[in-house]
Image (spheres, grey):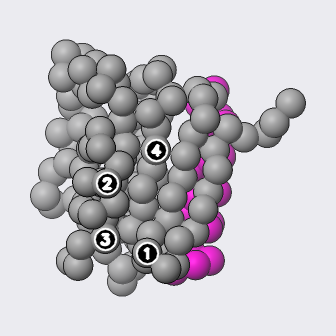
Amino acid sequence: MPTTVCTITPRPDLGILVARWAADAPPSQLRADYFAVLAAASQHQLGRWLLDVRRRDQLDPEIGHWTTHEFYLQAAAQLAPQLLHIAVLCSPARLSVYEVDPTQQQFLAFGLAAERPYQLRLFIDEGQAIAWVKEPA
């Protein structure tokens, strides 16, 4: 049985780190995956991330809160002075849940706010996500 459903690919040629989840996982595994993403980003000095969550159809409020309120803040501090840019590649179904679920809306409003020490954007098109995450600050 695999220990992770996340593949992490440093792309120094593009100046980004790509993490793709093949399926959902329990919160403890997702946390471990995110910490592995941060470790790879630190090792390769990549503060621009493409997180492909299209195959993760479960929206666990615990993970939503933890990523936006804790993990991304910790990652931004660890990668400083680079500004952490996070392009999240979502399925249309996931985006529709974000639009109607008040709890998810709160997490997104927090994570997308301009005053965060990281920049976070959601996309359904991978090309647009990569173009945004590669833009100069």
Dot label at residue 14: 1
Q: Main secondary structure of the magenta part?
A: helix
For marks 2 and 3, the one nearer the N-term is 2
| Residue that appears at 46% across and 22% down | 57
In this view of the protein, can residue 41 be seen by the observer? no
| Residue that appears at 79% across and 39% down | 3
Q: Amino acid at mark 2?
A: Gly
**SS for dot 3:** helix
**SS for dot 1:** loop
**Rendered position, 50 above or below 76:** above
Does residue 80 appear to the left or right of 10 in the view shown?
Answer: left
Q: Position of residue 96 (x, y in %)?
A: 24, 20
| Residue that appears at 46% across and 28% down | 62
Residue that label 3 marks: 134
Q: Is residue 30 magenta?
A: yes
For marks 1 and 4, the one nearer the N-term is 1
Q: Amino acid at mark 1?
A: Leu
Q: Residues within 10 Å of mark 1 (few under 14, many from 20)?
A: few
Q: Residues within 10 Å of mark 2 (few under 14, many from 20)?
A: few
**SS for dot 2:** helix
Quick one: quadrant of the C terminus? bottom left
| Residue that appears at 34% across and 60% down | 130
The residue stretch that appears in magenta? 26-45
Residue that label 2 marks: 127
Does residue 131 appear to the left or right of 43 in the view shown?
Answer: left
Q: Mark 1 touching mark 3, by CB under 8 A? A: yes
For marks 4 and 3, the one nearer the N-term is 4
